[in-house]
Amino acid sequence: MPLLPCRPLSTLRNPTSGLMRMGSFDDVWGAFQERFLRAPVWLPGTPMSLGDIGVIDRRGYTQIARLADFGISFEEKPFRAESEYLVTSASAKIEDFDVNAAVSDPGGILSSAEASMRVSFSSAGGFVVRAMNVQGTMIPNVLSVEEQIHRLVAKKPFWNREWIYVHEVVSAKPCIVIVSAASGAHAIVRASAKAGLNSFVQLLAAGSASTLSEQSSIDQYVATRTRTPFMWRGRWLGGRLRKRFIDRGSWDEDEDRAAEPLFEDFDEPAAFDRDLDDRQVRA
């Protein structure tokens, strides 16, 4: 078996502190699980692909390895997802502004245009998700994957109980995710492109560059025209003996719910308020 490529748990991008605010994480995580039965990619903008193996701590999701690093094969299959998402928390308010400026060349021909979206929040942990050209991919043969893992573990234990492998990813192009840090938070997302388009939505759909400006008390954000994951599902070893794989954040119907809670980390996201290091997650 190849040795685990130990990758440092480096700090991920964060416009504020470099670590997640647990209140924001709790609110956004719970809302995504309730609405989509999937977790948000956290921190927003974090790269994620099918077959990734990672952990979650105060820095969000950090990739440690891939299934392929251990010779574990899997299938990939697209699944149907809504083509567009415009989702806001109860505390978020958005307003689109149509093209309000254009630049003319010397001949008087409009050469570029700009439109914007204003976002405001009445509490911390509010969020806005705006995603277009959405695609979903999944690993349909998870049982085969887990049989391979078990066979390898039987020969040489290597799988850490903290590891989660990614079996579903939902991505978008373009993708905007904004999370508030406090009441009164606000930001403006600007999109610009060649003239001929007259709304913020049209500019986004055309692949216009997006920038966040005039922001205040924004905790996390990503605004990009490149394909970016924004929701996912993962599986990890579950049960008191950690011998079976289950979806992170779901109750296992075969276990006695009166027994020791199996998913206290997802039921109470504050359990991720910790710092992991290589010694805690390597094989």
Image (cartoon, helix red, strand yellow):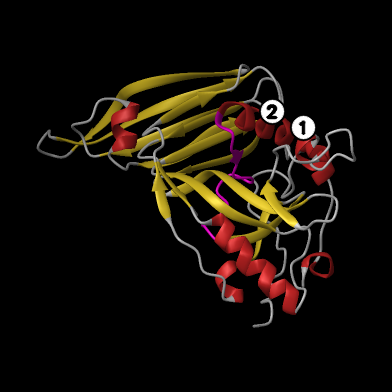
The range drawn in magenta is: 36-51
The answer to whether the residue labelled 2 contacts the one labelled 1, judged by CB atoms less than 8 Å apart, is yes
Tag 2: residue type?
Gly
Q: Quadrant of residue 146?
A: bottom right
Q: Which mark is residue 245?
A: none
Cα separation between marks 2 and 1: 6 Å
37 in the magenta segment: yes
Q: Is residue 279 left or right of residue 116?
A: right
**What percent of the width, then of the height, locates residue 271?**
84, 43
Q: Earlier in the sequence, mark 2 or mark 1?
A: 1
Along the line of sight, the residue nearer the viewer: 43 or 65: 65
- Magenta stretch, main secondary structure, is loop
Are there few (<14), some (14-19), or many (20+) residues within 10 Å of tag 2?
many
User: Would you say residue 70 is visible in this rendering?
Assistant: yes
- Closest to the observer: 133 or 234? 234
**In the image, what residue occupies the spot 72% across and 69% down?**
8
For image coordinates 25% across by 25% down, the residue present is 198
- Please tell me whether mark 1 sits on a helix, a strand or a loop: helix
Q: Which residue is mark 2?
A: 125
> Could you tell me the amino acid type at mark 1?
Gly
Q: Position of residue 68 (x, y in %)?
A: 55, 72
In the image, farthest residue toward the bottom: 2
- Residue 23 is tagged as 1
